[in-house]
Image: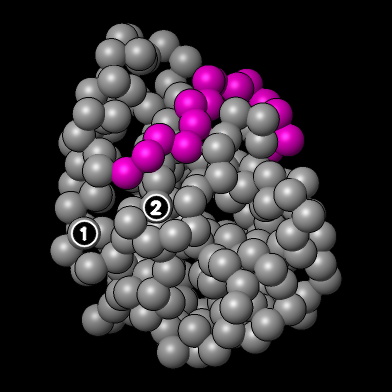
């Protein structure tokens, strides 16, 4: 059975795709067949592509069917449940689990990137936390280092634990170049997050997943 991880974040735009791509590169360097998956992507460019999906596919070293790597591609860059409503689409979590099962049959490692933060709504009754629970994958949390990140990270950790999911690790990603006391904030998070820190990513004007790869440690696949 292949290994797989669910990537969540303390908010939107905190670097989930950057870390997901870096992990794909890291596993590929270890000789694994890797595939990135973005179950729900909201927002497309003039060519009808979603940037996150494009980056995840580029970081993968196997070619999988687009409908497996990105089951739901929505036009508007808004909350998935609203974008789906605009597109007259229902985001079906059970369908996503079937897509992941097929993808895992083709790869040694699948990195699944969630949409937005851990509790972002996907339809009228379910959110990204419900998706993570249905997929039953260990979670990697990306903490966007900026003012307020301590509260967001600790609340996200609580939400993950409340669903009985394993937090396999977390990554600190500095998204505010002017944040004060970065090292002290990271130390506070390290003391309060009950999972290993997999890496610290300094602020990058132009985020580079290959550069980040060297900064990360692979998570331990064994349950604690």
Q: Is residue 157 visible?
A: yes
Question: How are the colours assigned in the image?
Answer: one colour
Q: Nearer the viewer, mark 1 or mark 2?
A: 2
Position in image of residue 30 (x %, y %): 74, 49
Is label 1 in a helix, a strand or a loop? Answer: helix
Q: Is residue 51 left or right of residue 126?
A: right
In this rendering, is residue 89 above or below 211?
Answer: below
Report the residue at 68% width, 51% height from top. Answer: 27
96 vs 137, left or right, is right
Q: Is residue 200 magenta?
A: yes
Label 1 Cα neighbours within 10 Å, binned few <14 / some 14-19 / many ≥20: few
Q: Which residues are magenta?
A: 195-211
Q: Say the numbered circle drawn on residue 161.
A: 1
Q: Quadrant of the C terminus?
A: bottom left
Q: CA distance from mark 1 to mark 2?
A: 11 Å
Above or below 75: residue 204: above
Could you tell which of marks 1 and 2 lies nearer the N-terminus? 1
Q: Secondary structure at mark 2?
A: strand
Of the numbered discs in the image, which one, if any, rests on residue 168? 2
Determine the residue positioned at 60% across, 28% down.
Answer: 215
Between 75 and 136, which is closer to the camera in this rendering?
136
């Amino acid at each position: 059975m292949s290994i797989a991880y669910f990537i969540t974040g303390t908010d939107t735009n905190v670097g989930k795709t950057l870390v997901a791509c870096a992990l794909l590169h890291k596993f590929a360097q270890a000789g694994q067949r890797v595939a990135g998956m973005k179950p729900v992507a909201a927002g497309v460019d003039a060519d009808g592509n979603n940037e996150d999906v494009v980056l995840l596919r580029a970081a993968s070293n196997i070619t999988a069917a687009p409908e497996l790597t990105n089951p739901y591609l929505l036009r508007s860059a808004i909350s998935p449940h609203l974008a789906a409503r605009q597109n007259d689409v229902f985001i079906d979590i059970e369908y996503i689990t079937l897509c992941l099962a097929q993808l895992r049959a083709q790869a040694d490692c699948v990195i699944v990137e969630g949409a937005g933060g851990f509790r972002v709504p996907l339809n009228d009754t379910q959110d990204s936390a419900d998706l993570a629970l249905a997929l039953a994958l260990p979670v990697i949390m990306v903490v966007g280092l900026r003012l307020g990140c301590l509260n967001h990270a600790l609340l996200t950790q609580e939400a993950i634990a409340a669903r009985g999911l394993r937090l396999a690790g977390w990554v600190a990603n500095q998204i505010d170049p002017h944040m004060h006391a970065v090292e002290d904030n990271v130390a506070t998070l390290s003391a309060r997050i009950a999972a290993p820190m997999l890496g610290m990513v300094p602020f990058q004007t132009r985020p580079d997943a290959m550069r980040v790869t060297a900064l990360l440690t692979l998570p331990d696949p064994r349950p604690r």
